[in-house]
Image (tube, helix red, strand yellow):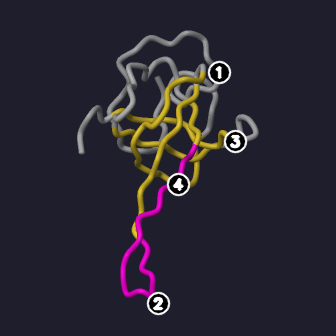
Amino acid sequence: MRDIGVDVKPPTGEWDGDQNCPFYGSLRLRGQVLEGTVANVGMLGTIVVERDNVRYMQKYERYEKRTSALSAHLPNCIGGVEVGDRVKIMECRPLSKTVSFCVIENNGGEA
């Protein structure tokens, strides 16, 4: 297992030969490190991560809640991710049309 340059817990799973794994494969990570909640795990090797943010509406002097969804690659060595888990994702090269992030840590159901 190699060092990815970010202080995260090492994965506990085994490597299955996936070259798009930042820990065992050849995928390089750079750029943003984001945290969010898993919204969907239906795709093979990919999850959808939702991030909530609050935006101030000056006209109404109120705040509105906004949600953004990002697709992220899920390496098999991390595994065990379920809907509602908090995960940490990091930017990488584009792996497909919508996937430009990779999961680097699963924090489970922590809030």
- The residue tagged 1 is 19
Q: Residue at x 45, y 82 (%)?
A: 57
Q: Earlier in the sequence, mark 1 or mark 2?
A: 1
Instruction: Tell me if residue 92 is in the magenta stretch.
Output: no
Give the number of the disc on residue 85.
none
Q: Answer above or below: position of 28 versus 63.
A: above
Q: Label 1, label 2: how many angstroms apart (C-alpha)? A: 50 Å
Q: Mark 1: which secondary structure?
A: loop
Look at the image and give the residue range highlighted in magenta: 55-70
Tally the numbered discs. 4
Q: Residues within 10 Å of mark 3 (few under 14, many from 20)?
A: few
Q: x%, y% of residue 36? A: 41, 47
Q: Answer above or below: position of 99 versus 67.
A: above
Judged left or right of residue 77, residue 110 is left
Q: Nearer the viewer, mark 3 or mark 1?
A: 3
Give the amino acid at mark 4.
Answer: Ser
- The residue tagged 4 is 68
* Secondary structure predominantly adopted by residues drawn in magenta: strand
Q: Answer above or below: position of 53 versus 63.
A: above
Q: Earlier in the sequence, mark 2 or mark 3?
A: 2
Q: Mark 2: which secondary structure?
A: loop
- The residue tagged 2 is 59
Q: Nearer the viewer, mark 4 or mark 1?
A: 4
